[in-house]
Amino acid sequence: MKKNITFSADDEIIRKAREKAYKERTTLNSEFREWLKRYVGVDSRSVNFDSLMESLSYADSGGPFSRDEMNER
């Protein structure tokens, strides 16, 4: 079940956000729902990133490096 919520923001920000959403062929409602999913951690990309980083935990860069060593080409 979807619930309606009300939030407030500066008129100019809302106008710019609506323009951007229109250019991207979406709506503020849709964008807000996607943001809300990411905010609560439902977004699978963050889960995939954490999983990837865990799978690469064996990698060792051999560092720490000095500033000069990092800038060598």
Image: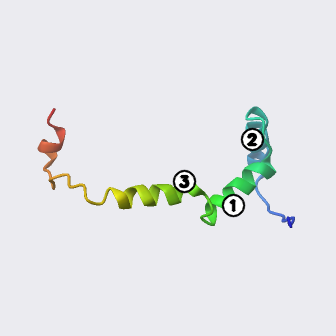
Describe the element under mark 2 as helix, strand or loop: helix
Q: Residue 44, percent across and down?
A: 58, 57
Q: How many labels does the image show?
A: 3
- Judging by the rendered image, the residue that carries numbered circle 3 is 45
| For discs 3 and 2, the disc positioned in front in the rendered view | 3
Residue drawn where x is 74% and y is 44% of the image: 17
Q: Residue reaching furthest front?
A: 55
Residue 24 in which image quadrant: top right
Left or right relative to 1: residue 72 = left
Identity of the amino acid at label 3?
Arg
| For discs 3 and 1, the disc positioned in front in the rendered view | 3
Q: Residue 20, percent across and down?
A: 73, 38
Q: Residue 46, percent across and down?
A: 52, 57
User: Is residue 22 among what the camera can see?
Assistant: yes
Identity of the amino acid at label 1?
Leu
Q: Earlier in the sequence, mark 3 or mark 2?
A: 2
Q: Residue 36 carries which label?
A: 1
Describe the element under mark 1 as helix, strand or loop: helix
- The quarter of the image holding the N terminus is bottom right
Residue drawn where x is 74% and y is 56% of the image: 33
Crowd band around label 3 with a 10 angstrom C-alpha radius: few (<14), some (14–19), many (20+): few
Residue 22 in which image quadrant: top right
- Judging by the rendered image, the residue that carries numbered circle 2 is 16
Identity of the amino acid at label 2?
Lys
| For discs 2 and 1, the disc positioned in front in the rendered view | 1
Crowd band around label 2 with a 10 angstrom C-alpha radius: few (<14), some (14–19), many (20+): few
